[in-house]
Every structure is written in C-alpha cells, then in structure tokens.
Amino acid sequence: MRSAAAAATTASAAVAAATRAASPAITPGWWQDYAIAVMTDAARQAAPVNDGRLEDDLAGLNRTFTPALTASVLATFQTGYRPVADALGALTTAKQLPQTCAALVAAVAAEAFTTNINIAMAAGGDSTQAATWFLHSLWITLKALGSPDVDGEITARQDAGLTVPSQIGPQHWWQGGYATWHAPLAGPRHRPVDRGDAHRRYARAEDDGVFRRLDPRI
C-alpha cells in the first residue's frame, strides 16, 4: 500500500508535468516564484513587506496558472486519489480504457441525461453550479479515459440539445475558462512561516536600514 507521502509525491510530479504541458511558462522556477510569493503573503504579519509588489506578483502568477488549472485537476484525478488511480491502472492493464470511454459517452448521450442536466441548469443557483461542476468533471473523466476528442464530444452533446455553459464548452473547459470554483493561492490559506532570505524580494527599504539587504532581483 502506498503511503500518503508517496501518493502526494506522485500526484505533485504529475501535476507539475501536466501544467507545464498545458502552459510552457510554468517551469520549476515559476513554481519557486509562486511558492515564495504565497508564503511571503502568509508571513505579512511577521514582517513589513512591499504589499504592492506582492499583490501584483500573486495576481500575475495566478493568471499564469489559470490556463493550466484543469490540467492540474486531471493529473490529480489520475494519480492523487488512490481508488481512481487504481481503477484507471486496472483498466489500462486490461486494455479496457476505450470500451469504458465509449460506455461513458453513450451514457452522456442518453435522452434522460440531457433532460436532467437541462433541468438543473435552468433552475439557477446551487443547482446550476452543481450541474456545471458535474459536466466539467465528466469532461475530465473522458480525458482520463483516453478520449481523443473531448471537444468533439462536447460539441456533439450541444448539438443534441444539452445545455453546456460557455466556460465549460469546447476548448474553454481545458484552457482555464472555468475557474470560478478555484480560490487563487494567497497567504491567508497557509499558516505564517518564519521570514527568511526568500522573502526579501518583497522587503521595504526602511530608513533605519533593517531591510536594506534586499533580494538582487528587486
């Protein structure tokens, strides 16, 4: 049985590979900058920082990550949750991924499925949000099962009358169009950490010289 640490390491490696494939700007160095910005935000209360620069960097880093958000969800779906990872592994070993994918496509194409989703979409509020998340999860599942053309499957369902919000429509579902559920990373989501050299890029050059040792990149 894999340990939680091993599962987390596998998932993080898969997320790193998937997000870089989806957005080449997300390099190992980018993750380092992202971590520094987030953890510095968490340490705001421990030391004065250049709030304007930090806010700008966090906003820019989150914008870069958004187009790769679904790719990171897919990688986590495939590797980070053991029951799903084991099931996908078994299907792969048995060479049953195409058949399973076809069965899911057929289920989504059923008239009753279209009717139920459309009712939920028309209801508004939490019902619409849940239905949108459900469809987004279905598209990710199709991708995990090896569908060669998820966009084509979505278009086919739309042509058959399924209500598909634009943010999870063809291409948009994969390119970060659906991100309202994702809270951008920021300091309040993490416990404060001890300040150190990594945070000096956001230090303010105070008159008393305490923060004169600034990161060379400033």
Image: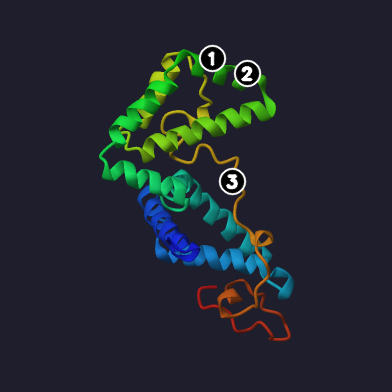
Specify the amino acid type for callout 1: Thr
Q: Nearer the viewer, residue 137 or 107?
A: 107
Q: Secondary structure at mark 1?
A: helix
User: How far separated are the C-alphas under marks 1 and 2?
Assistant: 11 Å
**Residue occupied by mark 3:** 182
Task: Give the residue type that dot 3 points to.
Answer: His
Of the pair 27 and 105, the residue shown nearer to us: 105
Query: Which quarter of the figure is the C terminus placed in?
Result: bottom right
Q: Identify the coloring.
A: rainbow
Residue 48 can be seen, yes or no? yes
**Separation of residues labelled 2 and 3 (CA atoms):** 23 Å
Residue occupying the point 37% across, 55% down: 17
Residue tagged 2? 122
Please tell me which residue lies in front, 51 or 194: 194
Horizontally, is 108 left or right of 129 in the view? Answer: left
Sequence-first disc among 1 and 2: 1
Which residue is labeled 1 in the image? 115
Name the quadrant of the N terminus. bottom left
- Dividing the picture into quadrants, the one containing residue 56 is bottom right
Q: Position of residue 100 (x, y in %)?
A: 34, 32
